[in-house]
Amino acid sequence: MSGASPPSATSLGAVSPWRRFWQRYREDWVAVVALVVVIILAILALTAPWIAPQNPYDLSGLSLRDARRPPGFVGSGGYVHLLGTDAQGRDLLSAILYGLRVSIQIGLAAGTVALVLGTVLGILAAYARGVVETIIMRLVDLQLSFPPILLALVLVALLGQGKAQLIIALVTAQYAYFARTAYGAASAERSKDYIEAAAATPLSARRIIFRHLLPNAMPALIVVATVQIAYAIALEATLSFLGLGLPVTEPSLGMLISNGVKYMMSGRTWISVYPGIALILLIVSINLVGDHVRDILNPRLDR
């Protein structure tokens, strides 16, 4: 008689946190579709220099004879402009791919720096308490009282155009959200008895912060990071639409939309519509992913 097979790791409940997270995540097909869209757009942006028919940043390769041509037009370069061209003669498909690349780069860079800066300040305030807590959190509250778009507009106007200047403006406009989130999560954990006991022992502050406070604050920070990356992309597009983002030689999605607005009434809607669709797809997909991640990481919001 054959022996009984040993129980699997899954039946014992020894499922890795990532696998358990994915099992819950894929229960919502809308979130799965949104994740697939984000991945596809990210791959298209990453491979833009190799798959785009034209380099939209190379001004010497543009021809005004190809300007404002409808989708399907065969340009002087000999290839079909599937989405048409803009007012400068850029292939719109190529410009959108490069614009996605810029938007994702700036969104990830600004979101990552704001996450690190805000987390450090929030957890430091929660752990140190006293004067340090008061100074940090009053500065955070003061910044949160200003609309992010207004603060970003002022900083970009002062710093000038460029990727570095834009990232600095976005980080300054967003880090307070991470600081407030990290402070709230860390403060709730800091008041618990085991943290008080650890602080009374010879355990270093670094060990308490990285082993106890930070891990308990990470779920909330991950959700905020997802939302803020999408918001950073939207904010960058808004600044570029207003002419305060990147230089005209590096068109982003916001600038492409802005360049086509003046031609909407003449029937050349593709110049603004296609970049707008790409921007909406990216932002909505990231927000849907972040919304579902929030539901998974916060049991009180579980549906």
Image (cartoon, rainbow, N blue to C red):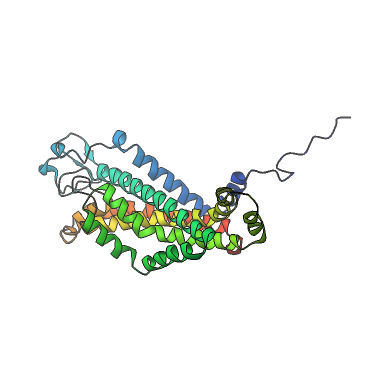
Left or right of residue 194: residue 250: left
In the image shown, does 120 or 109 lie closer to the viewer?
A: 120
Instruction: Note whether 44 is above or below 150 in the view shown.
Output: above
Please identify the residue farthest to the left as the structure is shown: 65
Left or right of residue 194: residue 223: left
Quadrant the C terminus occupies: bottom right
Q: Position of residue 184 (x, y in %)?
A: 52, 63
Instruction: Note whether 17 is above or below 257 in the view shown.
Output: above
Left or right of residue 292: residue 102: left
Quadrant the N terminus occupies: top right
Q: Where, by quadrant of the figure, is residue 44 drawn?
A: top left
In the image shown, does 5 or 80 lie closer to the viewer?
A: 5
Q: Position of residue 100 (x, y in %)?
A: 32, 46
In the image shown, does 251 or 4 lie closer to the viewer?
A: 251
Residue 303 visible in the displayed image: no
Q: How many marks?
A: 0
Q: Position of residue 279 (x, y in %)?
A: 33, 53
Please identify the residue farthest to the top as the structure is shown: 1
Q: Position of residue 11 (x, y in %)?
A: 73, 44
Please identify the residue farthest to the right as the structure is shown: 1
Residue 142 visible in the displayed image: yes
